[in-house]
Amino acid sequence: MTTQEVWERLDEIHAAIYSDAERVVPFWIEVCTLFKASPQKAKVFEEQKASKLSSLVNTTKLQGLWRVCFKSEKLAEARTQMLYMMMFMLFGSKMADPDSISQTDIQATLSKMSEMKTYRHWAVSVCFGYGVSTIISRVNDLNSSSP
């Protein structure tokens, strides 16, 4: 799944994985596609995807995979991780020290919007849709509203 696909389904994936059910269908993989593949590989991929969509998966196993991915079982922590991933898409290694990202860096990023691929446009809209200077507040807002 792409970062955008995960972000858009994060709440419902978390709810399914941490539900009272012992097993769930991994419905979230329905959106998965191969961007580059031979027709034969694409066919095999679609067959494997259909098989997974018709099979139940143990939630304990999925919870373990969630923790490996997000280092926590909390939805709020997963959101934070995802937002930092989006910021990394925009600012690269500077994101390791968000305080070092200057207004000039932000203006340079925004000025390149027309050259950006669709996924970066999306990351800009998520990260800056609440104001450039408030990304950490955005993380905190999301986190305070989650279980």
Image (spheres, rainbow, N blue to C red):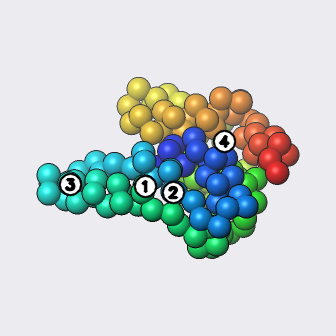
Q: Would you say residue 9 is visible in this rendering? A: yes
Secondary structure state at the residue bearing disc 3: helix
How far apart marks 4 and 1 lie (CA) works out to 45 Å
| Residue type, mark 2 in image | Pro
Decide which of tag 2 and tag 1 comes sooner along the chain.
2
Q: Any mark on residue 43, and which? A: 3
Decide which of tag 4 and tag 2 comes sooner along the chain.
2
How far apart marks 4 and 3 lie (CA) works out to 47 Å
Q: Residue at x 63, y 38 (%)?
A: 127
Query: Does the residue at mark 3 contact the one at mark 1 (Cβ under 8 Å)?
Result: no
How far apart marks 3 and 1 lie (CA) works out to 15 Å
| Discs 3/1, front | 1
State the residue position of label 1: 53
User: Which of the 4 image quadrants contains residue 54?
Assistant: bottom left
- Asked if 126 appears above or below 36 in the picture, the reply is above
| Discs 4/2, front | 2
